[in-house]
Image: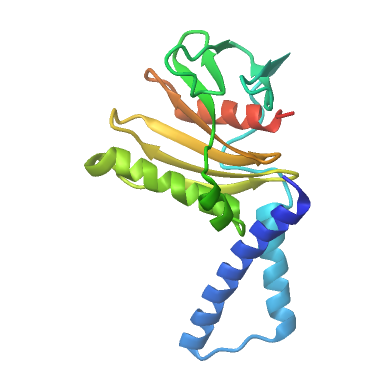
Amino acid sequence: MNRTRIKHIRRFVIEAWFKQIQWDLIAAHIRLPVFFFLILLAASFFSCYSSFSSIYGFDYPLTKSFAKSNSGKLNVQIPQGWFVAEDNENNTVDLWLVKEDYSATIKFIAVSLDEETTKSFSDNELIKVVELNKVLIKSKLRKSFKGFTNEELFGNSSVFSAYQYVDEKNQQVRTVVFKLGSQFYESTAFAIKSFNPAEIFKTQNSVLASIK
């Protein structure tokens, strides 16, 4: 993602944060000096975006081998103890990584948007794609939906938007949405068996950091 788009996303988040601050100050009849506000703004900006940090780490060991997606647009390093699988059902998965003991999986799917939707997403597009994905998840789970948790934005040269939820099988699922070139992707990770979800999500982060 280019720097201009990253700035748009950063500005959107900061503006939302500033508006909330404004309303809180008005309600309390408090006015902050301009210089103090700038300090707060800078602190918020750099704490959120200055480093490649996340709830989960980025230190799961990766092999030196790269896996190329079916579209050829996405290349990632394969985690140790994982392999590349094929989607034999309908080829909707662009890249599919599976743990060797079949206890977990990480899928990369290209997000398809029609022309009208793409135009409506011209500003703050990453955030809007994430919101669209959330609507689809809620619609799919219906009464089983229990809410989203661990929502975060992280990244450096690229911006990733992540969130978690519990699926119909009561499994922890983590989806990360990002843009590579002109294409949006969603990376979904979850443990198939009783396995530590945090370890899988750390693996997912490590793979995302290796994207070429």
Q: How many marks?
A: 0
Rendered residue at 52%/15% (across/down): 98
Image position of 186 with respect to 126: above or below: above
- Considering every residue shown, the one lying at the far left of the view is 143
Q: Residue at x 53, y 11 (%)?
A: 85
Q: Compared with residue 49, is residue 200 higher up or lower down, i.e. above or below? A: above
**On the image, which quarter does residue 170 sit in?**
top left
In the image: residue 89, left or right of residue 187: left
Outermost residue on the bottom side: it is: 29
Residue 205 horizontal side relative to residue 174, left or right: right
Query: Is 132 left or right of 108, judged from the image as shown?
Result: left
Front residue of 137/94: it is 94
User: Which one is in front, 111 or 164?
Assistant: 111
Q: Residue furthest front?
A: 115
Is any atom of residue 148 visible in this view? Answer: no
**Relative to residue 178, is residue 59 depicted above or below?**
above
Residue drawn 66% across and 43% down?
53
Rendering coords of residue 186 (x, y %): 54, 35
Image coordinates of residue 193 in percent, x first then y, are 38, 17
Q: Is residue 165 visible?
A: yes
Q: Position of residue 142 (x, y in %)?
A: 25, 43
Q: Is residue 212 above or below residue 96?
A: below
What residue lies at 67% left-to-right and 41% top-to-bottom?
182
Q: Quadrant of the N terminus?
A: top right
Q: Measured from the top left, where is residue 72 in percent x and y?
A: 68, 22
Is the C terminus in the top left, top right, bottom left or bottom right quadrant?
Answer: top right
